Image: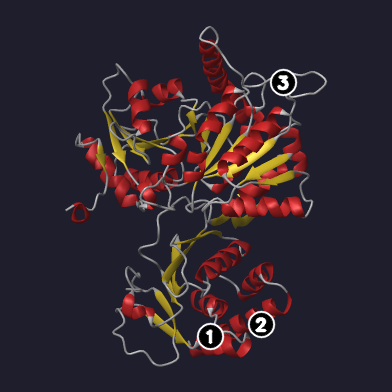
Amino acid sequence: MRELRIHGRGGQGSVTAAELIAVAAFEGGMFAQAFPAFGVERRGAPVQAFVRFDNQKIRLRSQIYEPDYIIVQDSTLIRDVNVFQGLKEGGIAIINTEKALTYPFPKGVKVITIDATSIALKTLGMPITNTTLMGAFAAASGEIKLEALEDAVRRRFKGELAEKNIAAAKEAYRFVKEAS
Amino acid sequence: MLEIMEGSHAVAESVGLCRPQVIAAYPITPQTHIVEALAEMVANCTIDAEYITVESEFSALSACLGASAAGSRVYSATTSQGLALMFEVCFNCAGMRLPVVMTIVNRALGAPLSIWNDHQDSVSLRDSGWMQLYAEDNQEATDLHYIAYRVSEDHRVLLPSFVCFDGFILSHTYEPVDMITQEQADSYVPAFKPYHRLDADDPISFGLFASPDYYMEFRYAIDQAMNQARSVLPEAGRVFSEMFGRDYSGLVEEYRLEDADCAIVAMGSICGTVKDAVDEMRNDGKKVGLLKLRAFRPFPVKEVQKALSGVSTVAVLDKNISLGSKGAVALEIRDALYGSQIPVHDYIIALGGRDVRRKDIAAVVASAEAGKGDIFYGLREEVLK
């Protein structure tokens, strides 16, 4: 079983990202489970959402403490929340940031930084980075295929909005693939 | 076919497949997504039901009571304070022998206010005459609705049912669920045939006054109906497994109990985490198993006695507390095992949404084996100072 923890702020679409990643993983033939950290949703407050991936039925219901992957939707969270807590050695951290980060990252983890906000602003016209970061996650983790992600986005959003979100995900996917 | 969807939407869809004729509910977290989805299904004519909007849970269940007495299949859903507000009507539904089916999206009761999960709400309605079924996952949550309608409406039973599933932990979780088709649902849950109904051409009354010469016999009859449900529920579960391949033939489910020294007893979604913890402990050579209670009312006394007959220690996980006494499940287990000398240790756990991990289950088993029980597990001492 592999586990993903998404850190974001209320309003950034972390829960939606978790759900769509689970849908894409399931469509790719895996068992998947997505759930929020059951907070009281407030815009701007730190939130978490979780995804599990496995080849068999997932029974575990606890929150995720030792993830294989983390997605950080907003690098300013790193000041307030220990987003790296429990991240496994060899794990992958995908962090949205506009500028180079100077934090001492934990050893033995792969950190991918991406300016998802600029990509989202350019393609969506809004600084909502969840679908952009899903594209980065697909490229970095290999847990979900880009086509499955596109299907998942089209199931949730309609028409032009879906296509804009897909364009954002694709750009992030290409960015991560080219950077690695 | 397996599909991935949110637990609440899976439940709403399965309820829709049961063809309720009247739905009345008042939205409350974390039940909201279910009733929103059903309201949409009614508005889009996906299901042929009347959706009655009400100003409170008391009215929601009262509307269901009236509609059920008039011969309709009815549905409601609630949680926590909403269920508390229905308290009086719950007893009336059972007393009038109305087969109302209601989803309880389990949530803690205030004060202090908590939107998070435990079983205090439904467990507090223990004595109301409603059957209570608890789901481990969203598959079971959907399937138990078909079973609940079939058994509630069975003329040998005629009692209302709670289908309990854990708020947020299941209701807001996306996971794969196998939905049956409308045709399959129709064959498993046939049209409601009321035993009695309100009819202007053949007038009868429900729930009137019973003098001391009659009241006890009414209460006895409800208890007898619960006894009937002890066999009708497994029978309906067997038919379900024959038709759809998923086994709900037991009021309880045993997991790796056959040679277990220590049995964990639990109900609801925590059972999934317990199963993973049991596998880990088994890998370390510990003989541990799980007894999952699918039914809390009627309480499966004989099944519990049989399942626990060979164990040397029992650890009960209670997501509720009967304040001034113990957890409600432990009390039942002790009663069922009375005279057996098997020690039953109670652990009040996961109240108000406190997370439970596999290591917590291992710690509970270690405590039980050391003879330390009847405690609140995982209290934060620094908060108590």
Q: Residues within 10 Å of mark 3 (few under 14, many from 20)?
A: some
Picture mark count:
3
The answer to whether marks 1 and 3 sit on the same chain is: no
Q: Quadrant for residue B320, please give it.
A: top left
Q: Where is residue A45 in the image (x, y as percent from the top left)?
A: 42, 72
- Provide the secondary structure element on which disc 1 rests: helix
Give the answer, above or below, for where B200 lies relative to B279: above
Q: Are marks 2 and 3 in contact (CB under 8 Å)?
A: no
| Residue B196 marker | 3
Tell me which amino acid carries mark 2: Lys
Q: Distance between the residues labelled 2 and 1?
A: 20 Å
Asked whether the viewer can see residue B245, the reply is no
Disc 1: host chain: A
Left or right of residue B375: residue A64: right
Tell me which amino acid carries mark 1: Lys
Q: Say which of B20 and A176 sits in front.
A: B20
Give the answer, above or below, for where B278 lies relative to B88: below
Q: How far apart are marks 2 and 3 (CA)?
A: 58 Å
